[in-house]
Structure formats: structure tokens, C-alpha cells
Image (cartoon, rainbow, N blue to C red):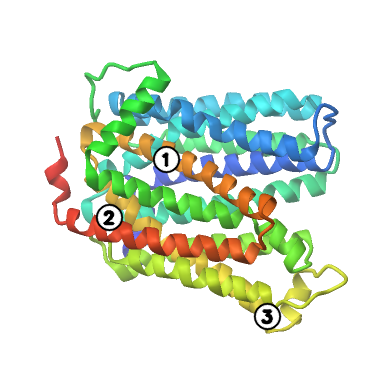
Amino acid sequence: MEKQQNLLLSRRFLPMFLTQFFGALNDNVYKQALLLVITYGLIQHASANVSTLNNLAALLFILPYFVFSATAGQIADKYERSSLVRIIKTIEIVIMLVASLGFMTHQLWLLLLALFGMGIHSTFFGPIKYAILPDILKPNELMSGNALFQTGTSLAILFGMILAGSIISISHDSLIWMCVTVLVIAVLGYIASRFILEQPRSASNLVIDWNFFRTSWQTIQYAKSIPVIFLILLGNSWYWFYGASYLTQIPELTHHYLNASENVVSLLLTFFSVGIGVGSLLCRKIGGSDVNIKMVPIGAIGLTLFAFYLAWGMAVVPNHKSPLGIADMFQSGMVYYHVMLAIILLGISGGFYIVPLYALMQAYSPRSHRARIIAANNIFNAIFMVASALFSIVLLSVLNIPMQWLFCATAIFSAFFCLWLLRKLKPLLNTTPNALED
């Protein structure tokens, strides 16, 4: 923990950490604010119903990951990365000005355009923020750096949702304070980016291919050509499939199974986010500073066992006529504690699982292609998240299977997938990461 604190205060790491934290925070503040103004009718939208607009918003944010990730990876490998970050952070301020104009004029199309812009911003920033870590950190700091990044991202998601809800609630119909908030966060991210140290170029002779679809295919094929990298990317993407399957269901779980209020949704999301943060920090503490796979099996076992624990907790919750608030949850018996504990433990297991895999991805990626490998990872993540949504829709809406069985099915698939992944991956990790460097 002392080493992590020293790293967090270092000139090499802190500016990058703060830049990515403010970026993730703004993503989540804006997305949550947009969903709230649509859901509660603060902006008129006669053209479509609330559910359709919410799904359209989710699609607009994730679509750039499919289209632009490979090109973003090429740019991040070719050009100096600290300068790229500052350009991207400047563009974020412009996007938030467009969003503010949409809030003030109550124009939904401007808000959706800004959301699409934030999706593009995140797509281009993603390969840089993870590719830069092996350049600014020592090999024995990669685990700590990734643990802190994952913790920061989890806290940014949590704070973003809470901050957006609080501002919308306090300001009522006036959205000026939401405009101020997203602009201030964007400016803070830009200021932090000014302190990122200049980085060496990885592939300055690279010729950018602007054919998005051809580049995406070539990037995926390159990742597949290195077996250890391809397996790590699959492992990372499975985490996003698994996490999306649970996080998407928490509002319905709270409403239908716990018969609890909207505040309890925020409470459960808080527990999940805090669990990921705790698991990420403990991963480095328990697993050691060297990049290794030791904690991944523990995380995989937890993702399976605690899913069954959550399903059991949901099954034994008694029926209530009136919705429960947060205080009621803590006063209504041990069954609710089981649900809350299961969600915390799932978060901790997720931290154990994902931190080593991200560190391994960075360590084993060839330096000249590192950002493009991370771009391929983003493409796979987006595909797996869409697959998760379709899987949940089929089980819950088409087959009308109870949510507990969705969680159990996901846990069983996770157990088989992780067993297969670890059996394939372990022999390949005997190769030294430096052997893959160009």
C-alpha cells in the first residue's frame, strides 16, 4: 500500500491518473444526466418513448468503439502521446460546450450529438491511457499502476452517477449547474494533462490507414497472431460481458426482487464500485508487484461462487407491499445483508480478475503495436457488451427466465470460460514479456 501511495504521488503517474479520472468522471456525469433528463421529462422528446431514447443513448456512446478504435490505436502508436492527450482533452471541452448548449436550449439532438462525441473522445483516449502506463512505470509498478487505474475508474463511475443525480435533483428544471459541472470537470482534465511527461514515439514511421473497417479487421488479425495476447483480450472482454450482465440488471433487481426505492439502486451500485476498488488495491497487495496471473483464478472462482450467493439471497428475500428505503434495507433482517454482501464480493472478485489481465496485456504487447493491441481490446469489449445485452434480453424477455437463473447461467459460463482460459494461458506466460518487444 505504501508503494501504491508513493506511485500515486509521483510526477510520472499522478498527472495521467488524474487525467483519466476526470475523463471517466465526465463520461459518467454526462451520461447519467442525459438519462435523467430524458427519463423525467426535463427535455421534451415527442419523437420516441423513454426506453427507446435510453437505448439509443447507450448505442451512440458505444458505437465509436466499433468504428474508430483501430484508427485510434494507430494514431496513439505513431504520435507522441502526451501531446495527443492534450488535444483530446481540448476537444472534450468543445464537446461539453455543445452539451451545455443542448441543456440550455433543451435540444435533445444536441445532447445526443455530444454523447456521440464523448464516445469518440473515450475511444481515442483509451488506447493512449493504457499504452502509456508501461512507458511511465517500471515493470514492478505495472500491477500497482493498473490497480490504481481500476480503482480510480470505479470511483469515477460511482461519483459521476451520484453527482449527476444530486445536481439534477437540487437544480430542478434549471440545467445551468449541470453545464457548469461538465465544463469544470473537462477543464480540470485538461489542466492535469498539461503535466503529463513527454513520451517516446512507438512507431513514428507508421502510415495511418483511414479506412476504419479495414484497419479494424487488420488490428484484430494482428492481435490473433500473438496467442498470449489474444487469450488475454478474450479474458478482459469476458469481464465486460459478465459485469454488464449484472450492472444492467441492478435497477430491475432492486425494484422487482427487493421492492426497494431508487436510492437503493445507488446504494447497490456503490457497493459494487467500492468492491472493485478494494479488490483492485488488494490484488497488488496479495499478488505481489511482479506481473503475474496468480490472482486471476481467485477472482474467477469468486465471480462464480458469489453469483450463486446473490441468486440465493434474491430467492429468500420476503415480499413487501411498500418500497423499502436505504434505512429499511439495514433494518429488515439478514436476508438483505446477504444481497449487499454478495454484490460487494462480486466487485472484489472482479478487481482480482481484471487488474492482472490488464497488466499482462501491457507487458506482453510489442512496444510498436501496444496502443493498437489496446484498441483491439476495446473492440472486443464492445462486442462482448453488446452480446451481454442480447443474452440478457433473450433469457429475461424472450424466454421469461427469472433473473436468478440469468445470474446462475452467467456464473456457470464464467466457470467454464475461465477454466479454459487459464489452461490455455498459463503455459504461454512462461515466455518473458521482453521477448515480444520489437
Q: Which residue is mark 2?
A: 141
Please identify the quarter of the rendering in which residue 247 is found: bottom right
Location of residue 28 with respect to 329 vertically, above or below: above
Location of residue 331 with respect to 353 vertically, above or below: below
- Extreme bottom residue here? 333
Amino acid type, residue under disc 1 in the picture: Phe
Residue at 70% across, 28% down: 111
Amino acid type, residue under disc 2 in the picture: Glu
Give whichever of 308, 29 is nearer the camera: 308
Image marks 2 and 3: residues in contact by CB distance under 8 Å = no
| Position of residue 205 measured from the top left corner of the image (x, y, whole percent) | 21, 18
- In the picture, measured across the screen, residue 428 lies left or right of residue 156, that is left
Numbered circle sitting on residue 380: 1
Residue at 28% across, 66% down: 294
Location of residue 43 with respect to 258 vertically, above or below: above
State the separation of the CA atoms marked 1 and 2: 26 Å
Secondary structure state at the residue bearing disc 3: helix
| Position of residue 437 measured from the top left corner of the image (x, y, whole percent) | 15, 39
Badge 1 or badge 2: first in the primary sequence = 2
Numbered circle sitting on residue 335: 3
Residue 291 visible in rendering: no
Please identify the quarter of the rendering in which residue 349 is found: bottom left
Residue 329 visible in rendering: yes
